[in-house]
C-alpha cells in the first residue's frame, strides 16, 4: 500500500480482556517497529522485526505483550489480560532497513482499557 | 541509557516569527537524528534526518543542525505559519540498535 495501515484506529476494551492490534507495512519494507505513546509523552520503543523475526523485543513491558510477523509483512501486537495502564496510542512504523532511513509511521491505534 | 530532552515543552508565537526548537541527548554515540512532526490524533511525519557525520539538513523553511559532541540538535523554522502548529519530536538512533529514542516533544502554536 501507499502507507502504513493500522487497524483498528480506536479500541475500547474492558480490563482483563485480550486485544490484537494490526499493522500493515509498506510493501517491500523489511523492517517493522511497534511503539507506544502515552498522553503528553514521546513514543516508546516496544519491538522491532527484521523480516519474520523479532530482532529486538527489549521494549515489551512484560509477558502480557507479544507480537508476531509470521510472513514478514503484516504484524499483530497482542496484549493479554489488559490493564488500565495499557491505555495509550500504539504506533507502527516500517522502513527499508537499518539506519532509520525511510521510516514511515501509521496513524496509530488508540487503545482505551476501562 | 540514552535520554532525549526537548526544550521548551510548549511554545506560542505570532505568525511570521522565526523560531528554534531544542533537543539534547545524553549519549553522543548516535547513528542519526530525526525530527518528526505529529498532528493531533495522527501518526508521525518525518521532517529531516541528519546522519551522524553531517552537521545540518535543510528542507524548505526548516533547518536542522546537529552537534554530536555536545549532544545537541536544533530545529529552526523560518517565517512560521499557522499550519506549522503541531508537536515536534526529535529522536535518535544509537549505533548498536535500530530503535528510535524519542524526546517528549515541543507543542508549537503559531497564532494568526
Image (cartoon, helix red, strand yellow):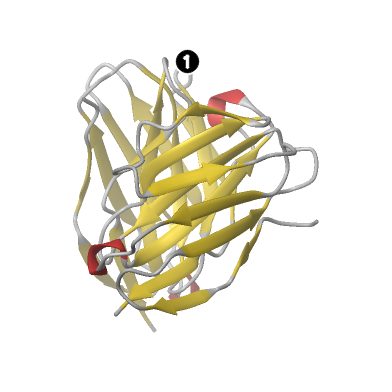
Placement of the N terminus of chain A among the 4 image quadrants? bottom right
A73 is higher (above) or lower (below) than A106? above
Placement of the C terminus of chain A among the 4 image quadrants? bottom left
Q: Nearer the viewer, residue A16 or B104?
A: A16
Residue A96: x %, y % from top left? 69, 32
Relative to B78, is A15 on the left or the right? Answer: left
B41 is higher (above) or lower (below) than A77? below
Q: Residue at x 32, y 35 (%)?
A: B73
Q: Residue at x 58, y 42 (%)?
A: A68
Q: Residue at x 53, y 61 (%)?
A: A20
A91 is higher (above) or lower (below) than B74? below
Residue A17: x %, y % from top left? 39, 70
Question: How many numbered marks are there?
Answer: 1
Q: Dot 1, how many residues are within 10 Å of its Cα: few (below 14), some (14-19), or many (20+)? A: few
Relative to B22, is A79 on the left or the right? Answer: right
Q: Which residue is mark 1?
A: B53
**Residue furthest out toward the bottom:** B112
Give the chain of mark 1. B
- Disc 1 is placed on an element classified as loop
Residue B29: x %, y % from top left? 33, 15
- Residue A61 falls in which quadrant of the image? top left
- Residue A22 falls in which quadrant of the image? bottom right
Amino acid at each position: 500500500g501507499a502507507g502504513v495501515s493500522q487497524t483498528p484506529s480506536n479500541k475500547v476494551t474492558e480490563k482483563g480482556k485480550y486485544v490484537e492490534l494490526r499493522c500493515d507495512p509498506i510493501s517491500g519494507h523489511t523492517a517493522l517497529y511497534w511503539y507506544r505513546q502515552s498522553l503528553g509523552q514521546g513514543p516508546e520503543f516496544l519491538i522491532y522485526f527484521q523480516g519474520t523475526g523479532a530482532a529486538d523485543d527489549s521494549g515489551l513491558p512484560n509477558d502480557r505483550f507479544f507480537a508476531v510477523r509470521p510472513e514478514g509483512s503484516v504484524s499483530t501486537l497482542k496484549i493479554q489480560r489488559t490493564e488500565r495502564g495499557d491505555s495509550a496510542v500504539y504506533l507502527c512504523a516500517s522502513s527499508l532497513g537499518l539506519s532509520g532511513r525511510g521510516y514511515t509511521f501509521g496513524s496509530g491505534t488508540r487503545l482505551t482499557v476501562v | 541509557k540514552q535520554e532525549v530532552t526537548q526544550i521548551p515543552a510548549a511554545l506560542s508565537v505570532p505568525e511570521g516569527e522565526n523560531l528554534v526548537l531544542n533537543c539534547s541527548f545524553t549519549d553522543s554515540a548516535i547513528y542519526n537524528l530525526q525530527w518528526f512532526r505529529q498532528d493531533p490524533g495522527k501518526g508521525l511525519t518525518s521532517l529531516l534526518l541528519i546522519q551522524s557525520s553531517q552537521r545540518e539538513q535543510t528542507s524548505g523553511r526548516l533547518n536542522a543542525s546537529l552537534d554530536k559532541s555536545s549532544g545537541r540538535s536544533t530545529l529552526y523554522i523560518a517565517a512560521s505559519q499557522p499550519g506549522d502548529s503541531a508537536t515536534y519530536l526529535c529522536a535518535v538512533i544509537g549505533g548498536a540498535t535500530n530503535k528510535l529514542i524519542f524526546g517528549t516533544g515541543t507543542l508549537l502554536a503559531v497564532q494568526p
